[in-house]
């Protein structure tokens, strides 16, 4: 009787173990698409078995539930997320500048340069024509406006990047608070440190953070996780988040500060935030410097040629054609002065009414007046710098996305939920449960028979 009862207890325990395993498989299936979820595995342990002993009557026992998450694979995914976030943010911002520095023929600043020099060429044919002179002034105004607009577009692109940086910093702080909340849940009940639901919520937050900023995640003995930006700056420690902030220095460059006000910008070498910082702090100022050099070289060159001639009345020009404020920025401030059409110097001294100076001005289009290059060549270098960097970033985005996809696929193979595999497990457990039920039925019948014999 004792052996039959022991067998019944062992069988009942086996049914309980399989029920627990069924629950785990079911949870895997319903969380197959849950962000951050890692497949859980039920571990089964064979109980000690000795057919001659009631105390070691065998059966199966539940071991600890095991997570299939791999810390090294997660770190690899985060690292590639850092890289993809950096390249992706740069691609989006540089794509905006394609409209500022268009390569299409007949568009942008390059087209206005051509139109200005074309008007000068027509003026050189009819140097005393009021219409030709008026057209030169008109095209001069257009080229000045084109410089102004291009510079304004650069400024606006930088301003948008600054706004996005502010939003990105806010997102970092929000994710930090979310991670602290999860840490608190884990610390309040250490048993919850193995909770698959909490674990999935935590890793979903960490993956979202990894696309934004580079960090190191350090698991703690109490079940919490500490987050260090750039491996050095605390963002989350236990139940405390350390707020980061954004400021601008005297030159207008964006700087990211830690909770104590220390500048940590140089520690940002990955993620969307680093891409935005590089765009606003490095690329926009570089393109603006080049644009200002072009505006200055062009204006000085034109003013210099005109100053060497005489106007329609045979006098040296009373004023320049272009003016600008170098302190504020040549490109954004370049403008046409109050010069009149009659004051445009088409002739050379000693040749009133001639076109020598107008021809010299037309030749300026092919003269190396800006950094040893013609205006068109110098502008082409600016557009090439934008285009080359954008093409490089696009290639990097494709590479990083492919590498990230490979890492995510590897993670899915190791810890993702395969519905067909889990369904197979369900069938196996169902058969085991049915078999245990049949054993229990036989044991129950046997128990009734033995009890009947004893009555």
Image (tube, rainbow, N blue to C red):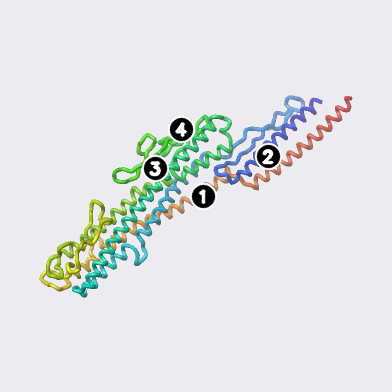
CA–CA distance in space, label 2 to label 4: 38 Å
Residue drawn at (10%, 71%) of the image: 350
Relative to residue 153, is residue 204 drawn left or right?
right
Q: Residues within 10 Å of mark 1 (few under 14, many from 20)?
A: some
First along the sequence among labels 1 and 3: 3
First along the sequence among labels 2 and 3: 2
Residue drawn at (65%, 46%) of the image: 421
- The quarter holding residue 53 reads top right
Say which mark, if any, is on residue 415. Answer: none
Decide which of 172, 81 is in the foreground and name it.
172
CA–CA distance in space, label 1 to label 3: 23 Å
Residue corresponding to mark 2: 22
Looking at the rendered image, the disc whose residue lies closer to the viewer, 2 or 1, is: 2
First along the sequence among labels 2 and 1: 2
Q: Quadrant of the N terminus?
A: top right
SS at badge 2 = helix
In this rendering, is residue 50 above or below 349?
Answer: above
Horizontal and vertical percent position of residue 228: 43, 36
Residue drawn at (29%, 43%) of the image: 250
Residue corresponding to mark 1: 405
CA–CA distance in space, label 4 to label 1: 33 Å
| Callouts 4 and 1 close, C-beta under 8 Å | no
SS at badge 4 = strand
Residue corresponding to mark 4: 240
Say which mark, if any, is on residue 268. Answer: 3
SS at badge 3 = loop
Residue drawn at (19%, 70%) of the image: 358
């Amino acid at each position: 009787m004792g052996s039959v009862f022991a067998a019944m207890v062992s069988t009942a325990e086996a049914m309980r173990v399989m029920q627990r395993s069924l629950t785990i498989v079911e949870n895997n299936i319903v969380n197959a698409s849950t962000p951050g979820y890692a497949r859980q595995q039920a571990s089964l342990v064979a109980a000690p078995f000795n057919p001659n002993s009631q105390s070691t009557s065998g059966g199966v026992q539940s071991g600890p539930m095991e997570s299939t998450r791999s810390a090294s694979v997660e770190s690899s995914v985060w690292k590639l997320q850092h890289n993809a976030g950096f390249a992706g943010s740069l691609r989006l911002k540089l794509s905006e500048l394609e409209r500022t520095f268009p390569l299409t023929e007949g568009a942008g600043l390059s087209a206005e340069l051509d139109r200005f020099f074309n008007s000068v060429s027509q003026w050189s044919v009819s140097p005393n024509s009021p219409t030709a002179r008026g057209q030169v002034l008109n095209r001069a105004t257009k080229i000045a406006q084109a410089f102004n607009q291009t510079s304004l577009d650069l400024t606006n692109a930088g301003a948008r990047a600054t706004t996005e940086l502010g939003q990105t910093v806010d997102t970092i702080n929000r994710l930090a608070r979310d991670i602290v909340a999860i840490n608190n849940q884990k610390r309040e009940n250490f048993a919850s440190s193995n909770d698959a639901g909490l674990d999935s919520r935590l890793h979903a937050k960490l993956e979202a953070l990894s696309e934004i900023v580079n960090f190191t995640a350090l698991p703690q003995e109490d079940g919490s996780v500490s987050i260090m930006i750039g491996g050095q700056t605390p963002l989350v420690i236990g139940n405390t988040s350390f707020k980061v902030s954004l400021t601008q220095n005297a030159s207008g460059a964006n700087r990211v500060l830690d909770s104590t006000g220390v500048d940590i910008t140089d520690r940002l070498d990955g993620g969307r935030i680093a891409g935005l910082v590089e765009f606003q702090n490095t690329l926009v100022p570089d393109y603006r410097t080049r644009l200002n050099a072009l505006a200055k070289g062009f204006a000085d060159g034109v003013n210099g040629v005109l100053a060497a001639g005489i106007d329609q009345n045979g006098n040296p020009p009373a004023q320049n054609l272009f003016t600008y404020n170098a302190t504020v920025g040549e490109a954004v401030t370049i403008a046409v002065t109050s010069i009149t059409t009659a004051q445009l110097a088409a002739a050379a001294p000693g040749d009133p009414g001639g076109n020598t100076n107008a021809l010299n001005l037309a030749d300026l289009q092919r003269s190396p007046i800006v950094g040893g290059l013609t205006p068109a060549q110098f502008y082409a270098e600016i557009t090439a710098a934008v285009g080359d960097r954008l093409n490089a970033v696009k290639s990097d985005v494709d590479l990083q996305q492919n590498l990230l996809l490979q890492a995510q696929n590897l993670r899915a193979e190791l810890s993702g939920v395969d519905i067909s595999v889990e369904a197979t497990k369900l069938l196996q457990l169902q058969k085991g449960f049915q078999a245990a039920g049949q054993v229990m039925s036989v044991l129950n019948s046997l128990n009734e028979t033995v009890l009947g014999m004893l009555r």
